[in-house]
Image: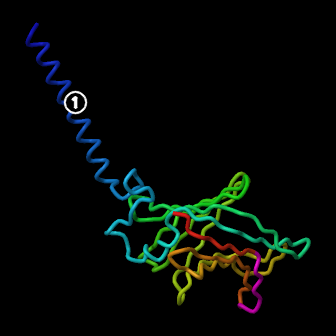
Amino acid sequence: MKSVSAWLVLVALFLLLSACQQTADRAASLRYEPDSRYPFGRPNPEAPPQLAQFAFMIGHNDCREERLNNDSGEWDSSERTWDAYYYMNGFAIRDGGRSGVNSNGNIRIYDSATAQWRVSYFSMPNYSSAEWSGGLEGDRLVLRRPQQAPGTEIDGFSRLTFLNISATGFDWTGEWVSADGSVEFLFWRVSCRKRS
């Protein structure tokens, strides 16, 4: 009976050590994710160096957004938050904002094969999603996606431009641009200041 008890204790000890090792292995494999020491995560040193181009977003940001009201032609403004974290073990950036009941989220990944950013966008409570691509153009980050002009069949694209990037904040604009670039229609302006 004593040998069975000793054997059960050894098996239990082996299982406990195995579970501890698996937990340690998992923690080591996710060491760049947000945690108590690094609440916004960290960039993985093996990630493409271009990951640093969107590092200005990392942290909590308080923003003021303005959207063009198509009916009145006036700008409607509101406050919003915009928070960003390193994601996918430091190979990507996950960011999102909230304004009233509306929330938006993005996953930003630099695609080394195409030398472009790929940004997947999601919005709730009225679900929508899209994907933008682009990169650094001078001192601005510019993302585009094909889009017809609202309510028409005129081809063009949606363009998001991040500008005035500094350690204390950033701005971005949303525009619709005709395919030949002759028409640019600004519909969204956002200005964010770093909180932490």
Please provide the residue range marked out in magenta. 181-187
Find residue 42 and report its horizontal and vertical position in percent.
39, 63
Find residue 171 and report its horizontal and vertical position in percent.
63, 76
Q: Spot the residue most to the top.
A: 1
Q: Is residue 184 magenta?
A: yes
Q: Which residue is drawn at 71% across and 63% down?
A: 79
Query: Is 22 drawn above or below residue 79 in the view shown?
Result: above
Query: Residue 113's quadrant in the figure?
Result: bottom left
Q: Residue at x 25, y 38 (%)?
A: 20
Query: Is 75 drawn above or below residue 105 in the view shown?
Result: below
Q: How many marks?
A: 1
* Element carrying mark 1: helix
- Residue 89 relative to residue 133: left or right: left
Tell me the residue that label 1 is attached to.
Answer: 15
Find residue 41 and report its horizontal and vertical position in percent.
41, 59
In this view of the protein, which residue sits in the foreground, 127 or 102? 102
Query: Is 38 drawn above or below residue 174 in the view shown?
Result: above
Q: Which residue is drawn at 70% across and 68% down?
A: 64
* Mark 1 neighbour density, 10 Å: few (under 14) some (14–19) many (20 or more): few
Q: Spot the residue most to the left.
A: 3
Q: How is the image coloured?
A: rainbow
Q: As shown in the figure, which amino acid type bears the numbered disc 1? A: Leu
Q: Is residue 17 magenta?
A: no
- Residue 84 relative to residue 171: left or right: left
Query: Residue 194's quadrant in the figure?
Result: bottom right
Find residue 132 and report its horizontal and vertical position in percent.
60, 72
Q: Quarter holding the N terminus? A: top left
- Residue 36 relative to residue 169: left or right: left
